[in-house]
Image (cartoon, coloured by chain):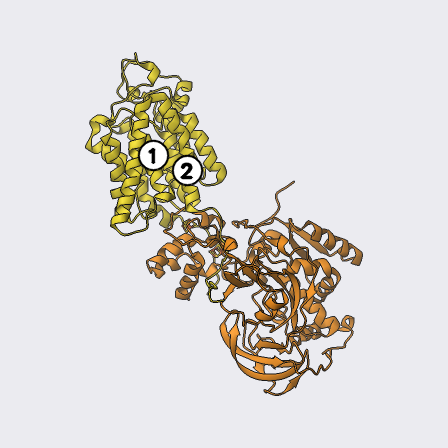
Amino acid sequence: MFFKKTFPGGIHPPTYKNLTQNYPLEEIPSPQKVVLPLIQHSGSPAEPLVKPEEVVSMGQKIASSDKYISAPIHASISGKVSKIDYFNHPILGKSLAIFIEDTGVHPDFIPFTKENPENLSPPELKKIIQEAGIVGLGGAGFPTHVKLSSPKPIDTLILNAAECEPYLTCDERLLQEKPIEVFKGLEIIIKIISPKSVFIGIEDNKKELIKTIEENLHKLGLNKIKTFILKTKYPQGGEKQLIKAITGRIVPSGGLPFDVGTLVHNVGTVFAVYEAVYLGKPLYERIITISGKAIKKRGNFKVKMGTLLSDIVEYCGGFIKEPKKIIFGGPMMGIAQWSLDTPIIKGTSGVLFLTDEELNLENSTACIRCGKCIEVCPMQIMPASIGLAGEYNKWNIAKEYSPLDCIECGACSYICPTRRDLVQFIKLAKQFTR
Amino acid sequence: MNSLIVSVSPHIKTKDSCKRIMWSVVLALIPTGCAGVFIFGLSALKVIIVSLITALLTEAIIQKLRHKKTTISDGSCFITGLLLAYNLPPSVPWWIPALGSFFAIAIVKHSFGGLGHNIFNPALAGRAFLVASSPRFMTNWTPPRWQIDTLTTATPLGIIKEKISHPLPSYLQLFLGDRGGCIGEVCILAIICGALFLLCKGYIHWYTPFTFIFTLGILSWMFMGNTLFKGNWLFHLLSGGLFLGAFFMATDYVTTPLTRRGQIIFGFGCGILTFLIRKFGGYPEGVSYSILIMNAFTPLIDRYTKTKKFGYTKTPNPK
Ligand code: SF4
Ligand code: SF4
């Protein structure tokens, strides 16, 4: 067999996907209370549209912004707004949030659009996507309607089903169980941007899923959509890496995918587009992976936005071992949390409860200049040199090694035999470069 | 929940630690040491043991005095001790490896700040120090155990350089180590076995050793003969310390360039320098000096061999 297409660099961490891969999707019942941060996306924060004591119903828009790069926020349970206050935010530390408490009355969920999707024009579809508050669900949280309004022509659309982060299996499960819905969502995006070619990028270790996808594409007669099988390697799902592997195009340094006429969307996002357009359902719930060896019940669950971690732990039967780290997202790029009083937000793809044995907590020592971090860096920059310069506070030298190009994939820190926190040095170097 | 660790991503790390790599190198160095002991007898074993013990003690004492954590278990001073012994003739008195090992660890490694901070390869610098301070012992070669009746005990390269009339060993003898030389450099077969192990593990790369050997081979072929392109290149590759140097010392992480391009330049420079020393220098052998000289150039090479970053274009995006 010929070599599978891929990108330079990369690593092969253990995947731990079997911890959750084979459990069917499950729904965590609505909690008594949700906390919805006003910023769950990149761009301007949303402004509250409701006041404390106001009664809201599930799916009701409770915050929005008149800025273009922003996304509205919807109530994820029916109940009463108890307060609007600062609260823990999984990424920002603290932010303003709307608290909703279940009061026992359950007004019905009202779909916000009832149009027949076939008759809608691209601008109307975009409007629905914007109104539904859809953002990239892979983690970055960039508003989807903005991404769909590319200033440059797009000829290639890629559905990112690589899910290269270890532990996470939510995209895989979703695609396995709801392929038709995801493809309908994909067709909506195709209708909006009308690309010449459409690919589903998927890693070669997901054999069963590849079969499901191909069968369903065939069944639906979607011959335009091609599955593209990629080498299993981290970070295969990084946008720039995925584009390089599939189209051979190289996104210029400092550029974005549309600079090479390409658009990448995540599976969860596309599913949300389907739900918004066909069911009139705004983005108030999502699928997340709960995994790690510390938690009793693992799997992929549908949860309401704003559900607190403590409610999830309770539903999952508590801990069987002491968790040493709690991470929102994957183990390579996710963010460590310090409290169980933290809400799930739109960009949360998973929550991991990791034990000592999974973490490998050794102290870092001096760089032995082995060059491994340079070999694995998918952006082909020199983490070692940035780390060495940073250690002596020589940030003007660190700057020469283009830290801004770093996608913070963590491959360099992962591979470093002396356990240096290279990503941290690079993050600092970025601040000095700006 | 007070014991939660909050630190930056990534949260998982590879199992390959510095320790594991260093001990693998030690493992890879064992065959050629065994071969040396087999060829030269117990005197070689004595040199190795003295060198090792001195290296370990020196490192432990220095770190104790400086109130630092002892790192002798990371294996790196073990490598230095072994390599120093491997670069000595088997006949040296016991204090030679002790002195060399002490110098390597105390001065070359720790006065620069310890593992990761030294500029020169400790073992090679230790050896250079010995050659400079007690040259008498450093050029006193013993033949393999079974060649007791041999009159001269020069190394093959010495035989050529000094124009001594003595039959040269065959290629097979050179390859297997049936000749005079330093303890660890004679048995090329054993060196290659160890090197292959490290190559397969991905702990070293071919870039430096290959360019080094290739450059020296070509230059020897071109200029080492009576006329141009008549040099006996194979002989020049197989005699002397080229293989030990190329695979185990020119690949030392700390003292060689970071990137592939840098490592290729390093190997190339080593090849040229070795050739120059062998052809024009006062010593028959040039591998260790050429590596030391290139060590000094490593920071410079690193500066001019940055990687070409992904997405780099001739006209960078204005930003
Ligand atoms: S430097 Fe940045 S892009 Fe390169 S491996 Fe490290 S985190 Fe990834
Ligand atoms: S991987 Fe670690 S030890 Fe190796 S060069 Fe990079 S920073 Fe240094």
User: Are callouts 1 and 2 both on one chain?
Assistant: yes
The residue identified by callout 1 is B83
Residue B65 placement (x, y as % from top left):
24, 49
Q: Is residue A298 above or below residue B217?
A: below
In the displayed structure, does residue B44 sit left or right of residue A275? Answer: left
- Count of marks placed on residues: 2
* Residue at left offset 21%, top offset 33%: B132
Task: Indicate which disc, 1 or 2, sits on the residue closer to the N terminus.
Answer: 2
Q: Colour of chain B?
A: yellow
Residue A428 placement (x, y as % from top left):
41, 63
Disc number at residue B25? 2
- Chain label for disc 2: B
Q: In the image, what residue type sits under mark 1? A: Leu
Residue A349 placement (x, y as % from top left):
60, 64
Q: In the image, what residue type sits under mark 2? A: Val
| Of residues B8 and A65, the one drawn nearer to the viewer in this rendering | B8
| Of residues A254 and B223, the one drawn nearer to the viewer in this rendering | A254
Quarter of the image where one finds residue B155: top left
Instruction: Describe the element under mark 1 as helix, strand or loop.
Output: helix
Q: Which chain is orange?
A: A
